[in-house]
Every structure is written in C-alpha cells, then in structure tokens.
Image: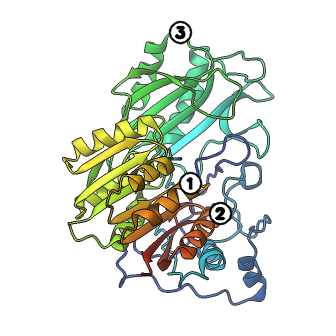
Amino acid sequence: MKPEKKRTGSTRPASRTHPARNSYTKPVARPKQTDRPKQIDRPKSSAMAADFETAQPKTETAHTPCPLYRKCGGCQLQNMDYPRQLHWKQERVQKLLGKFCRVEPIIGMEHPYHYRNKVQAAFAWDRRRQIVSGVYQASTHRVVPVESCMTEDQTADRIMGTIRKLMKDFHMTPYDEITGKGFLRHVLVRRGFSTGQVMVVLVTGTPVFPAKNNFCSALRREHPEITTIVQNLNDRYTSMVLGEREKVLFGPGYIEDVLCGCTFRISPKSFYQINPVQTEVLYQTAIDLAQLTGKETVLDAYCGVGTIGLAAARQGAGKVIGVELNRDAVRDAIANAKTSGIQNARFYCADAGEFMVGMANAGEKVDVVLMDPPRAGSDEAFLSSVCRLAPERVVYISCNPETQARDLQYMAAHGWKVEAIQPVDMFPHTNHIETVVSLSREN
Ligand code: SAH
C-alpha cells in the first residue's frame, strides 16, 4: 500500500539538488531470508537518539537539501540523512509491531532519489500572473511552484515544464476552482520505469478542449517518449485530482510496466505502486514469506491491478483469486493476466470484506491469503472471515503500521501467530512506512 499524495496539505517537495551522498547501500536484490541487511546501528549521541523515539520527526532543518522542504511538506524526514531516516522508521516499526515478533532490519534503497513513477501537479496563476505548477502548500489550496523534485521522476518534471510553456503558446489558462473559470486543473504523469512508456493525463475543469490535436502534437514533438495522452474532466469542487469522465486523446489510454517478470497495464485511475524498484523487493519478500510449493490456492485481497497475485502465480501459486473494489483496476488485472500468459488467476470486483464473508459462508478453501489493504487497514468482516477460512498462512502488506498493529492484535486474539516482520522503505524522505508481516495459525 501506498500513500497516494493528498491534494490538500502535503505533497512532494522540489529540489534542484540530487545528492547521492547517502549511503545505506543494501543492494536492491531479491531479499532472501539469509541475505538481509545488517541491523542499523543505533545513533551514538543522545540528541540523535531522541529523534528516533518520537513519532513525529523534527521539522527543523539540520539536513535539508530541498528549498521547498517547509512549504511543500511532502518529505517530512528531510531533516535526517538517509541512514537516520531508515533508523527512525525501524524504531517506529519496533515500537508499533515489536510486541508481536522480532522486526527484521528495514530494506532501504541504494539510490533513494527520483523513485516516484507517478507525478501530479496542480496548475495556477502566481501573483505576477505567470502559470505555475506544483503542490498545494500544507493545509491550503495555494500552489507551491515545483520545477524539479528529488523524489519525482525527472522525465515527468520536464514534461510539466513543457506543459507550462505550451499553455502560454496555446493561450490555455489554469482552472480556478473558486470561480470555476479557466481550463487546466492538474496534470498527472506516469512512467513505466522498465518499459519507458509515458502517460500524460490532462485534468480539465471544462470538457471543451480547443486545439487539442495541435496541443497533443506539440507536446509529443518535445517529448516523443509520451505514448498516451488522456483528458480527464473534473469540474467539481473537490480535493480529488481525477474526475469520472475520460477521453483518450492519443495512444491506447494506458501504459504498461514490467514487475517481477509480469507485464502490467496501468490506467489513469488504477492504483499502481509508485516506487517500482522497491516494489519488486516488497513483492518478493511477500512471496518468499508465503512459502508457495505450487499447489496452493492464493487469495490476493485488495489486489489493485493484480500485481502481487500475478507475481505469485508466476512463482508457484497453484491458483490465484484476486479481489479489488476499483472496477478499472479489476479490468486491468484481467488484462494483465492475459498479457503475462497466466491462466490460473481470476479477479473479482467487490468489497474485500464482503467477498471474504461470501467465501467463508460457501466453505471455500484457501491456503494462503496475501492482503494489502489501504491505509485504513482491513475490517472485522474480512479478518473474521480469514479466521473462518483458516488458511495455512496470511501475508499482510501494509503502508500504515498503526492500522496493521490493530489488525494483528485482532488476529493474535483469534489464534494467529506473527512469524516475521520485514519493513521495506518504499518512500524515502517521507514518514511513510511499509511492512510485510507473515502469520500462521497457532493450532
Ligand atoms: N495490492 C495492490 C494494491 C494495494 S493498494 C498493489 O500492490 O498494487 C490497496 C487497494 O485496495 C487499492 O487498489 C484500492 O482500490 C483497494 N481497496 C480499497 N478498499 C477496498 C475494499 N474495501 N475492498 C477491496 N479493495 C479495496
């Protein structure tokens, strides 16, 4: 799971510096149980140690490579160098989950910069009536201009710059959500890191797009790497970036990326992990913990576009059942199974809790449950049905150790034992934490 960036309040920072000085160099190879990074040493000084004890990082800037650190608020841990960030996260997981089982050392990134494959920017006028694009200042709808950012894909940042320039040439105005006047509201760029395919989604406040063909041609002339352009209409007063209606202006309307040997189709609205390098590490950790032998029926709950389940199918799951609420993501998951030549996977569009209740009532048999709920965590309908279905193992991936701790507490009270806890750093410089936990039945 994965923090989607909030549109009000924090989003990501910008920086002109791309420091490569942080050197927590765990190779980003497949994390074998036997090949884990060494435990990070505790900080030597008590002043540093104090940082690790607090849930919220300090906001002062002992170490702030980004000039927008304060205004943007997207990189809450920029006051620490990367090894200290990892240590802070390790301590946090220890505090929240350590009572269940030993916490393995967090797996960090070798090069923790420009890892975001998805970049979104709001467009607005500045005080001098120049078009700017960037993120909303914390708790406001004021746009902080961002030209480059140490976490974002650099191709995406360049495309944003070209769009700002073309808007002038095409007399295109930014949308004002108070007056409802203007045209371009947000731009979303997604890049498949392994395929190089690039999607640009132009989110507009009004449906009529004069000169759309010329605009798209001009954009593609400057960025031939763009493989698809979509117009998304969002005319409501909302902090959501994307609206319901979409029109494909160029290309197939989606991009593809390759993860764990499977090809994935990504639509504008589908959830897809934003750090593909660490996603492979995360999924491999989950699949290793699932201990598949080739016979198991695996349930991939909260499956998004089917990424974990399809990777598991490729690595020895006997059968995969995926369940996901977002219809577009389910459609993509079905297409992804086909493209990757995987025939033993089925995907269903449903609430995971309701789906599990249905499975438990029908007396279905599941051997392994892989679950990856959103930040709010799972719910009692789901967890109680997992208990009734009684799989051999549950592997729980979470982007919020607080809700995960709550859910693990429920499982522990219902006869489940936590066997491994592996944090993976999916979001360097932010305070977001991802963990993989495996559980087995105690009796
Ligand atoms: N496992 C996927 C997606 C994880 S994100 C991956 O790694 O890419 C969490 C997913 O849960 C999102 O796709 C979201 O649409 C879905 N979701 C949220 N609430 C849900 C619910 N109640 N039932 C099923 N899926 C849900």
416 to 431, vertically: above or below: below
Q: Is disc 3 surrounded by few (<14), some (14 to 19) or many (20+) residues within 10 Å?
A: few
- Kindly identify the amino acid type of the residue bearing the numbered disc 3: Pro
Could you tell me which residue is drawn at 37 percent across and 81 percent down?
33
Does the numbered disc 2 mark a residue whose Cβ is under 8 Å from ligand 1?
A: no
Q: Residue furthest bottom?
A: 44
Q: Number of labelled discs?
A: 3
Residue 129 figure quarter: top right
Q: Is disc 1 surrounded by few (<14), some (14 to 19) or many (20+) residues within 10 Å?
A: many
Left or right, 4 with respect to 367, comes to: right
| Image x and y of residue 421, in percent | 50, 76
Residue contact between numbered discs 1 and 2, judged by CB atoms under 8 Å: no
* Residue 46 vs residue 99, the one in the foreground: 99
Secondary-structure class at tag 3 = loop
Q: Which residue is mark 1?
A: 151
Q: Quadrant of the C terminus?
A: bottom left
Inter-mark Cα distance, 3 to 2: 42 Å
| Disc with the residue nearer the chain's start (1 vs 2) | 1
- Kindly identify the amino acid type of the residue bearing the numbered disc 2: Asn
| Image x and y of residue 270, in percent | 45, 40
Residue contact between numbered discs 3 and 1, judged by CB atoms under 8 Å: no
- Identify the disc placed on residue 210: 3
* Residue 186 vs residue 324, the one in the foreground: 324
| Image x and y of residue 187, in percent | 56, 32
Secondary-structure class at tag 2 = loop
Could you tell me which residue is drawn at 19 percent across and 48 percent down?
343
Secondary-structure class at tag 1 = loop
* Residue 300 vs residue 156, the one in the foreground: 300
- Kindly identify the amino acid type of the residue bearing the numbered disc 1: Thr
| Disc with the residue nearer the chain's start (3 vs 1) | 1
- Identify the disc placed on residue 431: 2
283 to 340, vertically: above or below: below
